[in-house]
Amino acid sequence: MTQPKTIIFIGPQGSGKGTQIEKVKSALERQDAVRRIVDIQTGRRFRSLAAAGETFAENKVAATLDSGQLQSDFLTAVLWGQAMLNRLDPKSHLLIDGFPRTVAQIADLEDACTFFERGHIDIVNLDTPEEVVRARMESRAREDDTEESIEERLRWYREETIPVVEYYRNRKGTAVHDIDGTKDIEGVYADIVASLTIG
């Protein structure tokens, strides 16, 4: 593998992004052991922040998670930006889950990619129908997966994040890989590594 990968995972909550980013990370580690792999999972970072529950920001993040609302662009940029500053360089592989979630967030990521001298971007679009992800979220029994929060997340994904995928379809230097998210974990993973030509 001659060039570092920049891979952004996009899909509704419950589409399996977190599981697949870990599997792709392991595949890259096997194939390219020399390079550092930086994975930034925005949702996980927000949940860690909320779990502390000590500051105003931590408590507000927790309340937002419980309601299913989008976190502020400011906080999102701070969290993934700090992770980039601490760990990323132009030679590293970069895996991102949960950012950008809105068209407004794209500009910050574009700026960061320019700063860190990132080239080609791959988008893994986990195309998963609402009824499938709704059932998955209901079955995983996470505290913030209430009926109301699930519906709110599906709404903002529909309204805010799907336009992000459409933006990347038209962006020069970007490949959007549409993956059938209804398959089982191994089936989705097989389609991802085949599309990205890794593994």
Image (tube, rainbow, N blue to C red):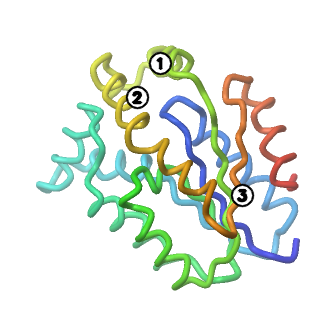
Three-letter amino acid code of the residue under disc 2: Leu
Three-letter amino acid code of the residue under disc 3: Ala
The residue at 44%/48% (across/down) is 44
The residue at 31%/20% (across/down) is 146
Residue 44 position (above or below residue 187): below
| Cα–Cα span, label 1 and label 2 | 8 Å
The image shows residue 92 at horizontal and vertical percentages of: 68, 75
| Cα–Cα span, label 3 and label 2 | 25 Å
Q: Is residue 1 left or right of residue 66?
A: right
The image shows residue 180 at horizontal and vertical percentages of: 71, 30
The residue at 36%/60% (across/down) is 104
Residue 136 position (above or below residue 15): above
Label located before the other in sequence (1 or 2): 1
Find residue 134 and name its label.
Answer: 1
Labels 1 and 2 touching (C-beta < 8 A): yes
Quadrant where the N terminus sits is bottom right
Q: Residue furthest left?
A: 56
The image shows residue 85 at horizontal and vertical percentages of: 46, 79
Find residue 175 and name its label.
Answer: 3
Q: Secondary structure at mark 1?
A: helix
The image shows residue 19 at horizontal and vertical percentages of: 63, 39
For mark 2, what is the residue? Answer: 154
